[in-house]
Amino acid sequence: MTAAPYKKEILVEDERHRGFPAVVKYGPYLLLSGSDGHRDLTTEKINPALDNKPTEQCRNAYGRVARRLEKAGYGGEAAVWIENFTSGQTWRLERMALWPEFFGEEEHGNVVSFGSQTKMNGLNMLTANVMAMVPEVPRVVGVKQPHKGRASRVTRCGDLVFVIGVRGKAHPVTKIDSPEEEDDGAFDTQLDNCFETIKSHLSKLDTPMGNLVRVDGSLRSVNNASRYREIAKRHFSGKLPFAGLSIGTILGGRIEQEVGGIAAAPGVMKEIAWSKRDPDRAEAATAGGLVFTSGCSGLLDGMHGEIRRDLYGDLQGQVKQAITTLEAALGRLGSGLDRALRLDIFLRDIYSDEAVIRTLKEILGRDMPALTIIGADPEYGADIELVAIAGR
């Protein structure tokens, strides 16, 4: 792929008429809003009969994704990166076994995934967050799926390399098991294993760790967020040269974190906007015509690094603070709110989603991006944290 002045295009509107798109196109990139499993595909209303039925809910969530992509002129086969936020992890393999049905009999083997157990809205058991690319862009798999109905470990698609969300239960080379959750050293050892596994996967496509432009970290406890960053720095010469997210989730299983991300493909230029308040951390990073931002807190003043204590309990004020931080980060890499393609919104109270959407519409107007809303524990006691993917 060569650099091009892509245009943000709304291909499919949200099915529930909430004022934001279901599918946004930017050059070869297709960004989708989150798709929930507890809503009927025909009526888009919550279906009580789906309570505690993960297979049926997965069919709804993935089915809506495939239908959106078909309406956009493509199909489920275009999916390349699927983040799964779920009410449980015990049915993870059953969930992924459905992929051939929605993402292509062969093509689903190109898809990379990320999965975390989170706070869910009522009966919902799955919110699927999908990024796709037009089929003309070739896929190259570096580490193949172990068998049908599973994800690729690392896939290059055009200018970007997607690496699967990994857990640090064992070291990728020695195969030595780490301590389990709450045992001494568990967090540190598991996180080291995560980054070593990511390094191993990326190496199969000749992609160095320094090429990472976005890294998502789901943590069993948000209290470990600062520790997460300190340990991560060990693997990147004392810096964090990527847009980073470290959010508290329920997670599931006897693990401390799940980590995955996106890298610039070999030979593709990467640029970093370093934080002015913390020069060892990236505020945003860009590659392949996209800008990725680090987490923008509703309580943290992005410019001065001060906690806005006056905003505690003020959700609308926190949304505005997060957007102010986001706008500044995007501007440093030649982007802006009007070019925001996707917002991932992490809420302490998942039931405040409609209030957040209303405030975002007041701020962004007609320039709304695709939205995915996830229940989680943001850092600093904030009610909201968001990360963005934007066009440059």
Image (cartoon, grey):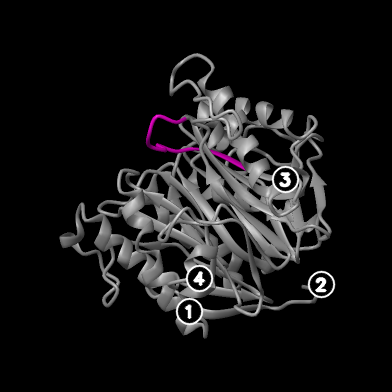
- Separation (CA) of disc 4 from disc 1: 11 Å
Query: Given contact means CB atoms under 8 Å apart, are the residues at marks 3 and 4 in contact?
Result: no
The image shows residue 375 at horizontal and vertical percentages of 41, 46
The image shows residue 334 at horizontal and vertical percentages of 81, 62
- Label 1 CA crowd tier, 10 Å (few <14, some 14–19, many 20+): many
Q: Of residues 386 and 270, which is closer to you in this image? A: 270
Q: Which residue is mark 3?
A: 242
Q: Magenta region's main secondary structure?
A: loop
- Residue 155 lies left or right of residue 273; in this view the side is left
Q: Earlier in the sequence, mark 3 or mark 1?
A: 1
Residue furthest toward the top? Answer: 184
Q: Which residue is mark 2?
A: 3
- Separation (CA) of disc 3 from disc 1: 31 Å
In the image, which residues are magenta? 245-255
The image shows residue 16 at horizontal and vertical percentages of 37, 73
Q: Which residue is mark 1?
A: 75
- Label 3 CA crowd tier, 10 Å (few <14, some 14–19, many 20+): many
- Separation (CA) of disc 3 from disc 4: 29 Å
Q: Residue at x 52, y 85 (%)?
A: 73
Q: Earlier in the sequence, mark 3 or mark 4?
A: 4
Q: Residue at x 21, y 64 (%)?
A: 47
- Can you tell which quarter of the image residue 292 is in? bottom right
Q: Amino acid at mark 1?
A: Gly
Residue 328 can be seen, yes or no: no
* Label 4 residue SS: helix
* Label 3 residue SS: loop
Q: Amino acid at mark 4?
A: Glu
Q: Earlier in the sequence, mark 4 or mark 1?
A: 1
> Residue 107 has which mark?
4
